[in-house]
Image (cartoon, rainbow, N blue to C red):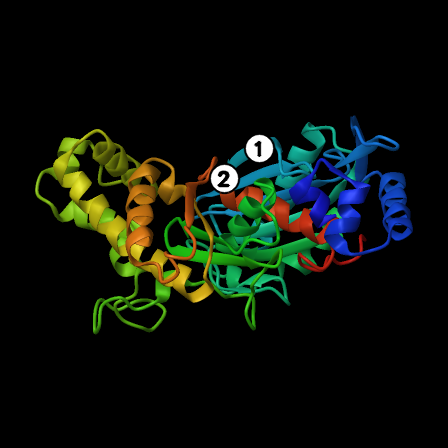
Amino acid sequence: MDLIRSSGPISRVELVNATGLTQPTISNIVRRLIDDGVVRETGDTVATRGKPRAMLVINSRAAYGVGIHVGADTLTCVVTDTRGGTVGRQLVAAPADGRPESVAARLATLYHEVTHGLGLPAQSVAGMAVVGPGPVDVTRGRFLALPGRQGSAGLDLTHALTGRLGVPVLVDSDAAAATVGEFWGRQVSRERTFGCLYMNSGIGSGVVLDGALHRGASSNAGKLGHVPVVRDGEPCHCGSRGCLEQYAAPRVLVARARAVRGLTRRLRIRGEDDDARAFDVLARAAIYGDEQARALLDESAAMLAEGAVLLANMWDIDTLVLAGPGFAVAGSIYVTEIRRRLAERAFARDVHDVRVDLSSNPRDSAAIGGAALVLQGSVAPGHGPELAARV
């Protein structure tokens, strides 16, 4: 399944060559996949000296995944098909009281509104993933902390929602989800070492090795934002000092912009604006040539580029994607600086280049990735998370 996903259209003979399995074994596996509806023949053939070879692809309508990203004030729900294409999206306000029962009820309601609105048969939905900034307890299916959600840390979402919805429910970090989403949707080969930098209110990362996300001991790997970059620097809520987030994250840049006399008034950033909106305004001003705004973004990009070099050197990655709302407006500034820094400082630069791209949908990348997590676990077992049995 993963070979067909990343290489399709692909013939049975090519699958034999890629896997080392025999022709009869591949034929039997493909027949079962076609009977199950997850793979289909395209109708195209490749001419050979013998019988023309039929080409295989994943059936995009075989299953759908639902991903919900929990933000500070909003919930973003995205539905994708089996190949990662977005088929539906809805953005709603998060519960104002933040109580665990309210959060679970709103998530369940949103799931039903979106899937019913799209007319999806219940059995076509592989499951739902709820993703947020973490840290997460994946085993118990809960967040240990969420911005603006007092009391939500004790909510076992997997248990609370699986029974209500009748589908498997996963809980994971937004950076991990975005990594899998970009890997899945771009049809990246499992032979590549794929990395993702995710920036929203904080900074995270993820790496895919041999087609599977590297999770670490507790599925909290990749917290690049909590790597110290300044000795005895600013204190961080993680308990350390001088963390990358304290110098490069959007909320920090907004605070610095507010401290510059006259800057926020000139850019029309209001005191009541949240950090996300204020950063979008700041980033747009930087793109349009405001010198003070550009200086702040350039400093952030330089710091994040150091993090990218660290990530590339640790894992010897060959592909890096920037995802998350923090890159939605001024992603080009970050891409340019990271490309330049990797070309100069990546340890293996004389052996291979590191391709750096911007996500095609930075704002929704975590929600899209949540849906991809479900689909990967459903149609490519062994590469994604294990899904509980459907209730």
Whether residue 168 is visible, yes or no, is no
**Which residue appears farthest toward the top when viewing the image?**
43
- Closer to the camera, 208 or 18? 18
Q: Would residue 205 be found to the left or right of residue 331 on screen?
A: right
Circle nearer the N terminus (2, 1) = 1
SS for tag 2?
loop
**Which residue appears farthest toward the front when viewing the image?**
49
Identify the residue at image location x=71%, y=60%: 382
Q: Would residue 288 be found to the left or right of residue 125 on screen?
A: left
**Which residue appears farthest toward the left when viewing the image?**
261
Identify the residue at image location x=18%, y=50%: 256
Q: Say which mark, if any, is on residue 89.
A: 1
Query: Mark 2 belongs to which amino acid?
Result: Asp
Q: CA–CA distance between discs 2 and 1?
A: 9 Å
Q: Quadrant of residue 243?
A: bottom left
SS for tag 1?
strand
Identify the residue at image location x=75%, y=54%: 19
Position of residue 349 measured from the top left corner of the image (x, y, whole percent): 37, 56
Query: Answer yes or no: do the residues labelled 2 and 1 have beta carbons within 8 Å?
Result: yes
**What residue did someone put label 2 on?**
364
Position of residue 242 measured from the top left corner of the image (x, y, whole percent): 25, 67
Position of residue 277 measured from the top left corner of the image (x, y, whole percent): 32, 38
Q: Would residue 63 be found to the left or right of residue 215 on screen?
A: right
Query: Mark 1 belongs to which amino acid?
Result: Arg
> What is the number of callouts on the image?
2
Identify the residue at image location x=48%, y=60%: 134
- Mark 2 surroundings: few (<14), some (14-19) or many (≥20) residues within 10 A: many
